[in-house]
Amino acid sequence: MKPPVSDSPPPSLVAYELEPGTVLFVHELPRVGQLPVLSAAEHEVLVLLLDGHNTRGIADARGTSPRTTANQVASIFKKLGVGSRAELAAKVLTRSRR
């Protein structure tokens, strides 16, 4: 995932360009110290989660084990302060193709 792009989302949102022409808008996270930073691998897993893939599908797509993927999903949940995939999806307001 690239750093936030210049398309100006509302102030409470952060925009990430996932790939050319695909932008993901997410709620800005509460500021307790520093914002959690996802690793490159976690960003890849996040994109696949948001596309509706299950743990095995993500592992297969990335060439990793389901256990590694499950650990990365748990890390994403912890960093973003969510407890489920539904809660994670609720943080995503818009993911549009341009």
Image (tube, grey):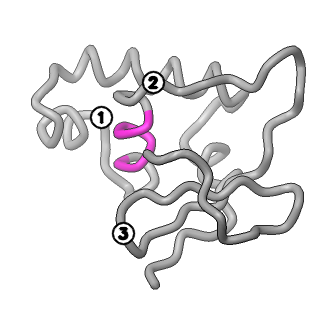
Image position of 67 (left or right of 85) = left
Image position of 71 (left or right of 95) = left
Q: Which residues are magenta?
A: 43-48
Q: CA gap, disc 1 to disc 3?
A: 25 Å
| Label 3 SS | loop
Image position of 95 (left or right of 71) = right
Q: For mark 2, what is the residue? A: 39
| Label 1 SS | helix
In the current view of this chain or complex, which residue is farthest to the front? 6
For the stretch drawn in magenta, the main secondary structure is helix
Numbered circle sitting on residue 67? none
State yes or no: residue 45 in magenta. Answer: yes
Q: For mark 3, what is the residue? A: 20
Q: For mark 1, what is the residue? A: 55
Q: CA gap, disc 2 to disc 3?
A: 20 Å
Q: Earlier in the sequence, mark 2 or mark 3?
A: 3
The type of residue carrying mark 1 is Thr
Which quadrant of the rendered structure holds the N terminus? top left
Q: Residue at x 66, y 71 (%)?
A: 7
The type of residue carrying mark 2 is Ser
Q: Earlier in the sequence, mark 1 or mark 3?
A: 3
Q: Earlier in the sequence, mark 1 or mark 2?
A: 2
